[in-house]
Amino acid sequence: MDCPLYEKIANQIEHQVHEGIFLPGAKIPSVRKSSKQMEVSVATVLQAYSLLEDRGVIKARPQKGYFVQEIQPQVLEQAKIEPTQNDTSIHTLLRRLLHTSQNNHVIQFGAAIPKSQFLPIRQLQRSVGRLMRLEPEICAAYEFTPGSLSLRRQIAIRMLDSGCQLQPDDITITLGCQNALMLSLQAVATAGDTIAIESPAYHGVLQAIEVLNLKAVEIPCYAETGIDLDLLEKAAEEWQIKACIVTPNNQNPSGATLNHQARQRIIHQSLMHNFTIIEDDVYGELSYKDKHERSLKADDKNNSIIYCSSFSKSIAPGFRIGWIVGGQFQTKIEHYAYVQSLAIPTLTQTAIANFLENGAYDRHLRKTRLAYQDNLARCQALIQQHFPEGTTTSNPRGGFLLWVTLPSAVNAMLLHTQALEIGIGLLPGLAFSLTAQFSHHFRLNYALTWDNKTDAALKELGKLCYSQLHSSRAS
């Protein structure tokens, strides 16, 4: 038996909300406007809106209209895991947010870019200056794919720390880790294929999937344990997954690190269900243990895991130097890299290779890790003291990103808007999923100059959260 017309309308609007067309806190069309759009009576629309209120999807505000309520995180154990494609409106929003992150007058809690004090600027300056004096012709030479041999040799040496036994020819230099992830996806998948991703996911992965017209299955990633391998197993049984993008060390944004058993299990799953692991290890060298965790690639007996990383988070974001170890896909990856960029800047590759050769990098990492740990402790203490009860944070063991979960009545997108008005930037949870499930989360960068001004900004964010709570209770 067909459901009533008002129920069909309610189902349609609820679907639009879950797809992110109407974001949490957004006003939906008025009763009269919906009546005209759908060519139904006002009474029918009122019935539909009443049903949506009963379901907790929308809420009426006297003399203002109807607004979308907070959407609770999806419980994938109780629902069919469906591949989805990116909602364009979310990524239009993300591009706008990232553009804001370039404003020097804003305290940048949002962008995953360390302040210059955490980067070896002076050493790189000397390296570049020496190259320009002694080898000025370096700027006139193309460094064709796969990239600088001296840099690839240094990377192979560094990857011994993660358990990988590599030759320089196993490595291709890329324009940062984002480029490496794009090349990986192009090598293993074609339009319409399904990719398993962590949820919350690094927003660059979501954008890559969008550009390549792929589908994604979001697998929950918990701050304490990492990607949910039970649900990954279910997804692999139900869908033909071509690849799984996973960050085993200090995941962005949750900060999760996989234990040894989980690393072995996901490798086994990839072999059983015939999908490719794309390992994103961009934060691997920033582990607070002062020891690089063993990479998935180190246990890749079938040469089927693709490994991606870069120096953007630890040496020089602006140099855009990353690398990829493609295994059985290496030839295809090198071809795509050549077609897309022809060559990688010679000067920056050589400068980083020289910096790695002189041993200064390890000293730099030890100093930086200690500073990040101090900042993390200070940041968590301030949040505990100045944010509403019910606010929780991740507890990363490396990197410089904190995942903050707010009380369900606090809308992180609204918090972003309000904070920006007073010169504070943050990245709301909507940027880390294809759905609106992280509407009361945000990511916070603590690789900042931590002073009284930074303290004050974090306290202001807490005040804005309290203000939202009071407003929601009053309404």
Image (cartoon, rainbow, N blue to C red):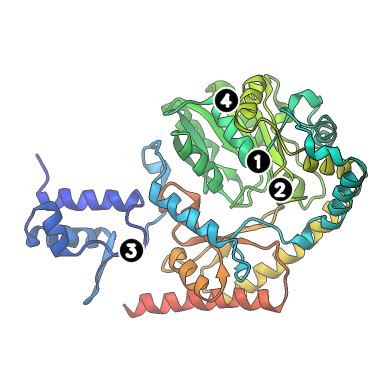
Q: Which of the two discs, 1 and 4, labels the residue nearer the N terminus? A: 1
In three-dimensional space, the C-alpha distance between marks 1 and 2, rounded to whole angstroms, equals 8 Å
Q: Give the number of the disc on residue 26.
A: 3
1 and 3 marks in contact (CB < 8 Å):
no
Circle 4 SS class: helix
Nearer to the camera, 95 or 287: 95
Eye-nearest disc, 1 or 3: 1
Residue 118 vs residue 175: left or right? right
Q: Give the number of the disc on residue 187.
A: 4
Residue 327 in percent (x, y) is at: 68, 23
In three-dimensional space, the C-alpha distance between marks 4 and 3, rounded to whole angstroms, equals 39 Å
The residue indicated by pointer 2 is: 312
Q: Give the number of the disc on residue 383.
A: none
Q: Which of the two discs, 3 and 2, labels the residue nearer the N terminus? A: 3
Residue 81 in percent (x, y) is at: 40, 37
1 and 2 marks in contact (CB < 8 Å):
yes
Report if residue 110 is visible in the image.
yes
1 and 4 marks in contact (CB < 8 Å):
no
Eye-nearest disc, 3 or 2: 2
Residue 262 in percent (x, y) is at: 63, 37
Nearer to the camera, 262 or 168: 168
Amino acid type, mark 4: Ala
The residue indicated by pointer 1 is: 177
Amino acid type, mark 1: Cys
Pick the quarter of the image with the N terminus.
top left
Q: Is residue 29 above or below residue 281?
A: below
Residue 196 in percent (x, y) is at: 50, 35
Q: Which of the two discs, 4 and 3, labels the residue nearer the N terminus? A: 3
Q: Which of the two discs, 1 and 3, labels the residue nearer the N terminus? A: 3
In three-dimensional space, the C-alpha distance between marks 1 and 4, rounded to whole angstroms, equals 15 Å
Report if residue 313 is visible in the image.
no
Q: Which of the two discs, 1 and 2, labels the residue nearer the N terminus? A: 1
